[in-house]
Image (tube, coloured by chain):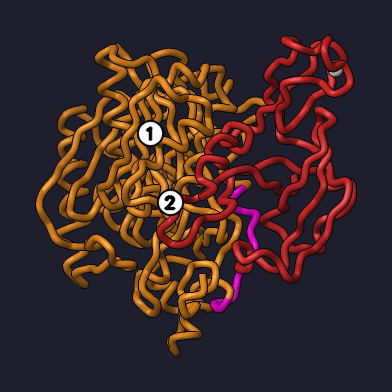
Chain colours: A red, B orange
Amino acid sequence: MAIARFWRENESRYNMQGKKCGVCQKVYFPARDMCPKCRRDSMGMMKKIQLTGKGEVISYSIIHDGLPEFHMQIPYTIAIIELEEGVRITGQIVDCKPDCVDIGSKVESVFRKLGEEGKSGVIHYGYKFKLI
Amino acid sequence: MSVGIVSYGGYVPYYRIEAGSIGAVWGVDGTARGKGLGIIRKSVPSPDEDVITISVEAARKAMKCCKVDPEKIGAMYVGSESHPYAVKPTGTIVAEAIRAAPNLTVADMEFACKAGTAGIQACMGLVSSGMIEYGMAIGADTSQGAPGDALEYSASAGGAAFLIGKKDLVAEINHTLSFTTDTPDFWRREGQMYPRHGGRFTGTPAYFKHINSCAKMLFDKMGTKSEDYDHAIFHQPNGKFPLRVGGAMGFSKEQLEHGLLTPIIGNTYSGAVPLALTNVLDHAKPGDKIFVVSYGSGAGADGFDITVTDNIKKHRKKKWQPLSELMDNFELLDYATYAKFRGKINMGGVT
Ligand SMILES: [Zn+2]
């Protein structure tokens, strides 16, 4: 199943660890081993960077008919968030009514269950966001 | 040689349900029943929260408020009776999520409502012996009461983490001791969803006997009396028991105030005394003395004599978020939504 794939990504899902290009200083999340802009110059210059998990909502959408793993939480909000480091990522906003989220809302990451492979399967964890 | 709390953090989920909303479904006056138990509302975990996520939030809060490198944590013990996995320790995921892995020992603990304080004791031993520099002890639960059962008014969710060490202590643990017997007051068999309790058997021979015996041992050992302490914390399965057990020892309402959270968040089981201790530390002044006795069914009690240090002021810097902020910011649920969130609705196998 997907156990191995999820497991390999635990470091970025659990701890929001990205990589920063030592040449142009651009931050990548998920982490990349090479900067697409600086290409060969960035080889060996990509440094691990711990993202703060803080950012701002750029765009959002309220989901009324979501994936089966989220059906307990309908309606819920999925947002594109620009983190302080300039990276844009997608994440669920939890612990608020959907109408509380706005463009420009400040958020920070929280640690939540992302899903599970049935009642007897492995549980996946990672980041979501809450309003601050 | 001193050992104690280097940093701490508590976490309570965002959702709540009031006693009145629970009673309404079962045809009883829930508000009156809540009053009898000393519980106004209790916390409810979101469907994407469990003991692992609660433990991670509490542990991260503790690590944010100190300068300790997480890789220096040599042991992690998570105490709970609602670990998400029966086999695979909660602590493995928590350790990874605070970057304490891989050079540490991890084990999950279980002793009903006192598994968290048992973890503090284990960490104290390892730190005192010099085997490890820092240990992290967490008490957290997402406990359930069977629908309509008295426990449904109290069983809630939350947890707290303590970084135990020798240097830069915010609170020194002067002494700890325990009192343990074989008492079948409350239990849950493997594979059962809800715990069972021995009705009236849960009070006098269980909670009161163990807490009183442990407290007496601690007073005798330290040569102290109730008036020597600024704060007292007792396990709180409801809002009444701690006032009764503490009152009989001579503790005033003021001494018990900051350590009594059950009326507004419910009984967080393994999280109860740990969360109460974080709230007391949030309010304490340097030099304050704290008397703590936890209780776990089965049964046992752990006592702690604690002195707050000057470092508590440093702890309350930029990244510190008092527990009261999480306790005061909540959204109320109706019973139907609560039942859905807690998996009490039979989905006919479609999960
Ligand atoms: Zn670059």
Side of B127 where B204 appears, left or right: left
Residue B253 makes an appearance in the image? no
Toward the viewer: B196 or B238?
B196
Q: Earlier in the sequence, mark 1 or mark 2?
A: 1
Residue B260's label in the rendered image is: 2
**Residue at 27 percent of width and 54 percent of height:** B245
Asked whether the residues under marks 1 and 2 belong to the same chain, the reply is yes
Side of B338 where B90 appears, left or right: left
Q: Amino acid at mark 2?
A: Leu
Toward the viewer: B287 or B309?
B309
Q: Which residue reaches farthest left?
A: B182
* Chain on which label 1 sits: B
Q: Return the x and y of residue B151 as percentages of the image width and height.
A: 35, 69
Within 10 Å of the Cα at label 2, are there few (<14), some (14-19), or many (20+) other Cα atoms?
Answer: many
Q: Return the x and y of residue A101 as percentages of the image width and height.
A: 82, 56
Within 10 Å of the Cα at label 1, are there few (<14), some (14-19), or many (20+) other Cα atoms?
Answer: many
Tell me: residue B350, above or below residue B177. below
**Residue at 60 percent of width and 49 percent of height:** B326
Question: What residue is disc 1 on?
Answer: B137
Tell me: residue A54, above or below residue A112. above
Residue A47's label in the rendered image is: none
Magenta-colored span: B326-336
